[in-house]
Image (cartoon, rainbow, N blue to C red):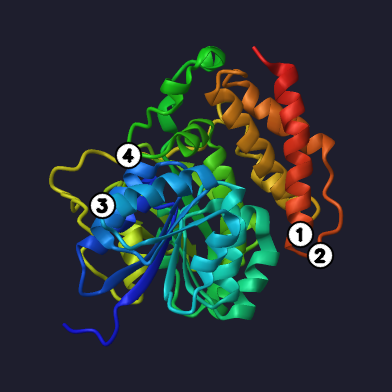
Amino acid sequence: MTFKKKLAVTVLGSTGSVGVNTLEVIAAHPERFDVFALSAATQTELMLAQCARFKPRYAVMASVQHARALSEKLKANGLATDVLQGSDALEIIAAHEEVDAVMAAIVGAAGLASCMAAAKAGKRLLLANKEALVVGGEVFMQAVRAGGAQLLPIDSEHSAIFQSLPEDPSTWAERVEKIILTASGGPFLTRDVATLRSVTPDEACAHPNWVMGRKISVDSATMMNKALEVIEAKFLFGLEPSKIEVVIHPQSIVHSMVQYMDTSVVAQLGTPDMRVPIAYGLAWPGRVVSGAKALDFKAMGNMSFEAPDHDRFPGLQLAWDVLAASVGTPAVLNAANEVAVAAFLDKKIRFDQIHALNRATLDAVAAPPVGGIEDLLELDAKARAFAHRLAHSMAC
């Protein structure tokens, strides 16, 4: 099959796990995709290797220091990629007129502004950054609608829901009874709850099924990732929070499900490999080979499902709590959690104190009326400041 035009892709967060997998899928289909720009925070050596392989027009680094280091390495290797620096540069490569699709894989609220830029510019926005929706909420969705952007979820769970829903979004509310997000339960699904206070960062990052970055791995261990996904699902699919359910599915084979009004359930299954939702997002509405291993149903063991244990995962309920609160409250939760996870990874607080810090920040920082993205970013900063002070007072 031939294509009229290659899809020009910007990969925001190209040195992270989602970014690396995205480039693997792109490399497998040189007739379909071109890399226009890449971005990273500090990994200059990996960025150099990616620039050498994909020859992007632009590479963006977070700091002047890292941008200068990359520029020198590129020149030494005879590579012509232009190096830019900072958040403004991220917005430039996300909204550039020659870009067709943007993979948004920058972890945390730091990726919000570039996601907004891509949305306003009407790009195909492949959203792997939960926080854009958790922090941006309806403000972000308004930008998507106003810009005419195509918003395609890349989280395995939300991609599964998207693939299981009818093509016409206007029918979702009347046809869907609920959506069911599956969760592996992470590394501590069967561990004695009383011992969780002694969990180490390395233990929390040892996910049994998925290979992920350290922050999202800790979120999986606390199930805060699922709380964020509930919030994300509410805005992505326009359903009431009461129509969103979470079940534990340790095998990570069923990636999520949609239950319809007639009680039929449609699910998306596959191996736990991020290349599958990435390939779907890049090729939508078509499909391309992802490179992932196919399921072998003859060799597959039993699949199990169970309700979440809220004593083990107290943070999960916070999703419904913040969605029932004032607009902007999800941004407070996200900011607190980013601070808490960073403090835990730095061994400044215990694993069980992550939830305590999140809950205390929600109790202390009220969301004022939100008129736009600036209000949300100001609220994010206020919540982070409180969470940092609290983490310091909790320090082990």
Seen at 71% across and 52% down, the residue is 323
Q: Amino acid at mark 4?
A: Gln
User: Which mark is on residue 251?
Assistant: 4
- In this rendering, which labeled residue sits more in front, label 4 or label 1? 1
Q: Secondary structure at mark 3?
A: loop
Residue matched to label 2: 371
* Inter-mark Cα distance, 3 to 2: 48 Å
In the picture of the structure, the residue carrying the numbered disc 1 is 374
Q: Real-space Cα distance between discs 4 and 1?
A: 41 Å
Dots 4, 1 in contact, CB < 8 A: no
> Taking 348 as reference, is 238 above or below it?
below
Q: Which of the 4 image quadrants contains residue 29?
A: bottom left
Look at the image and tell me whether residue 331 can be seen: yes
- Residue type at mark 3: give it: Asn
Mark 1, Cα crowd under 10 Å, few <14 / some 14-19 / many 20+, is: few
Q: Alpha-carbon neighbours of circle 4 within 10 Å: few (<14), some, or many (≥20)? A: many
Question: Which mark is first along the chain, 2 or 3?
Answer: 3
SS label for mark 1: helix
